[in-house]
Amino acid sequence: MNGTFRVITRRTALPAGASLVLLLVPSCAHVKVDPIEVKPIHIVHDINIRVDRQLDDFFAFQEKMAGSTQPSTTQAAPAQTAQAKPANGVNP
Amino acid sequence: MNITRRNIIVSLLVLVVPAVSHASTKEELQKRFKERDPKLVELKQAGTIGETYQGYVELVDERSKDKDAKAIVDEENADRKELYKVIADKEGTSADVVAERNAKRVFEKAKPGEYLKGADGKWKKKEAAK
């Protein structure tokens, strides 16, 4: 019984010791990670957004001017469809 | 005494007047852009001028003898250059960055059939979105 226990202890002690070492090694290891520089990307992105907004605000009149010319073309469309639509009971 | 006073006034005018008259304000620039816009749109739709990826307009055919179109292009580009600088100074960036952002904006807003000059220096007609 005592001999069997010794064998089991030896058999288990080795893997247990190895796994303990494996567990302890990463905790002891000092891994140095370079700081991730996110700030400049944020700044560039932020500037782009602000510049885009400035440009959109400045050229907002273009949309208004384009919009003021559009209704004449869109208004003409229903009149054409009304003319194209045949009267009831009349086949083209 | 009178001479000194006059000298001070003249000196102040010499210093202040050029500073005020040199740079256009955003409002003045916008007024000029507004006035020019219908003609600019017309020339773009006719395929006479197009937008470039640098944020400026150019004659599609460099050999074109259309003096009016050339004048519009020159005026538009001069005002754009000034506007880009005004925005760049305000936002703490360079005029080139502002020009690039404007190019992106106008490329997206361009209507089908209008000419756009890409980074490869070639003109392409914008196609209708599918």
Image (cartoon, coloured by chain):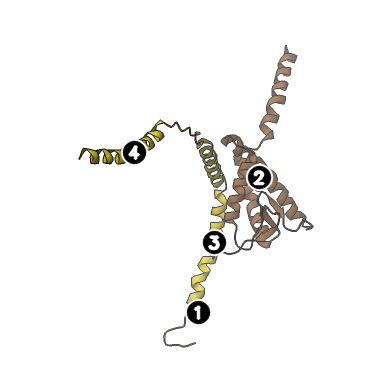
Chain colours: A yellow, B brown
Q: Which residue carries the number 3 mark?
A: A70
Q: Work out whether residue B49 or residue B32 is closer to the camera in this orientation and state it.
A: B49
The kind of secondary structure element at disc 4 is helix
B119 relative position to B128: left or right: right
A46 relative position to B63: left or right: left
Q: Mark 3 vs mark 4: give the one in front.
A: 4
Q: Mark 2 vs mark 4: give the one in front.
A: 4
Mark 2 falls within which chain? Answer: B
Within 10 angstroms of label 1, few (less than 14), some, or many (20 or more) residues? few
Kind of residue sitting beneath label 1: Ala
Query: On residue B67, which mark appears?
Result: none
A34 relative position to A16: left or right: right
- Labels 2 and 4 positioned on one and the same chain: no
The kind of secondary structure element at disc 3 is helix
Instruction: Work out how far the residue at label 3 is from the one at label 4, CA to CA, in angstroms.
Output: 84 Å
List x then y, in percent, for residue B55: 65, 48
Instruction: Work out how far the residue at label 3 is from the one at label 2, CA to CA, in angstroms.
Output: 26 Å
